Amino acid sequence: MEKKILLTGDRPTGPLHLGHYFGSLMNRKAMQDDYESYIMVADVQALTDNFNQPEKVRESVLEVAMDNIASGIDPKKSTLFIQSQIPQIAELTVFFSNLVTVNSLKRNPTVKAEIAEKRDIFGRDGESVTYGFLGYPVSQAADITIVRADIVPVGEDQLPMIEQTREIIERFHRIYETEIFPLPQAKLSSSPRILGLDGGAKMSKSLNNAIYLKDSPEETTEKLKAAKTDSGSTITFDPKTRPEISNLVTIYSLIHDQKPADAARELAGMTYSGFKAKLATDLNRYLAPVRAKRSELESKAHYVKEILEMGRIRTLEKAEETMKLVRAAMKINY
């Protein structure tokens, strides 16, 4: 039997952090044996809200690729590619854009939340939102369907994007009387979400509240030392009433493969400072192999670029195969 196809990716707006590692990178590594995996460095998507910072996006492409490889993504099993190097994605995005109303994009919960989050770019009421940003769910649908993906690992906040993709596919099939694309299924991570070290809703590159995979042990220790906790004095796990200390317990539980409640009981007698010091030591030990591999990759940029070039060639072949089917269905295969 042919393997089912998986598509996932990262926006290159900086190096990847602990939230990415536990939320997606570990899952990708585990799934690459069972799926034909495509991992996209989503530079076009990153430009929807970083269009005025192209250098930031360009410089982050290799960072994201190195973080993936250092975390265990095997180029022999997974295809790692750069979104902008697959022009068929842009072509398919244009065709899909005819099948989506502006109102449905405005109602998309993920789009609404991200516009509100980016008030500094798009204004308080989203009055300055760009066509590109409003339409990025259409581009995401093209990302997924260009390789005819069956499975898309996502966070819960991205579920509306998968639903919009399924709606586009169903409308395409109905209008053009074809069955080209599988209806993709979302694959949710089983790992709990890691909050930002400032107590924010999530670790974020833009909020500078994250521990990066590339951080040195010293940087990691300093960040954890300064991590927000609360005015309590005992270590417990209660995300609703004590989110900050519970977040640190969650990180501890993940690196020790424990349930958070069990980890909290184990740590109950420690002071906050003692716990933070232990967490830093244990986390640095846990990440040491990833960091060693990443350091090696930094000195072999040519090797990383070769992997991306191989990925470009493989993905182009798959993408053109898809577009031949699309053009035929749309009667534009002149």
Image (cartoon, rainbow, N blue to C red):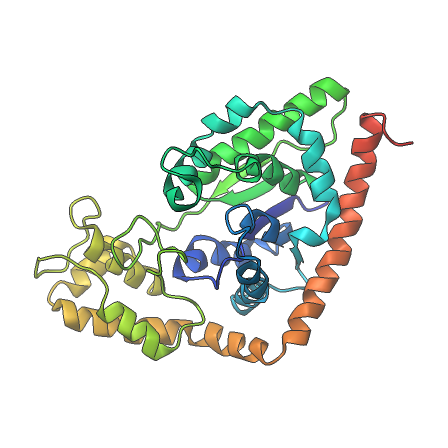
Q: Is residue 175 left or right of residue 226?
A: right
Q: Residue at x 56, y 65 (%)?
A: 59
The picture places residue 139, in percent across and down from the top left corner, at: 62, 39
Of all residues shown, which one is farthest toward the right? 334
> Residue 47, percent across and down?
56, 50
Give coordinates of residue 100: x percent, y percent.
60, 25
The residue depicted at 9 percent of the width and 57 percent of the height is 231
Vertical placement of 167 versus 92: above or below?
above
Q: Nearer the viewer, residue 66 or 7?
A: 66
The residue nearer to you, when weighing 189 against 304, is 304
Rendered position, 125 above or below 57: above
Residue drawn at the location 44% of the way across and 36% of the way down: 110
Q: Nearer the viewer, residue 73 or 112?
A: 112
Q: Is residue 203 left or right of residue 265?
A: right
From what the image shows, is residue 36 above or below residue 176? Answer: below
- In the rendered image, which quarter is residue 127 located in? top left
> Could one spot residue 1 in this view of the protein?
no
Could one spot residue 224 in this view of the protein?
yes
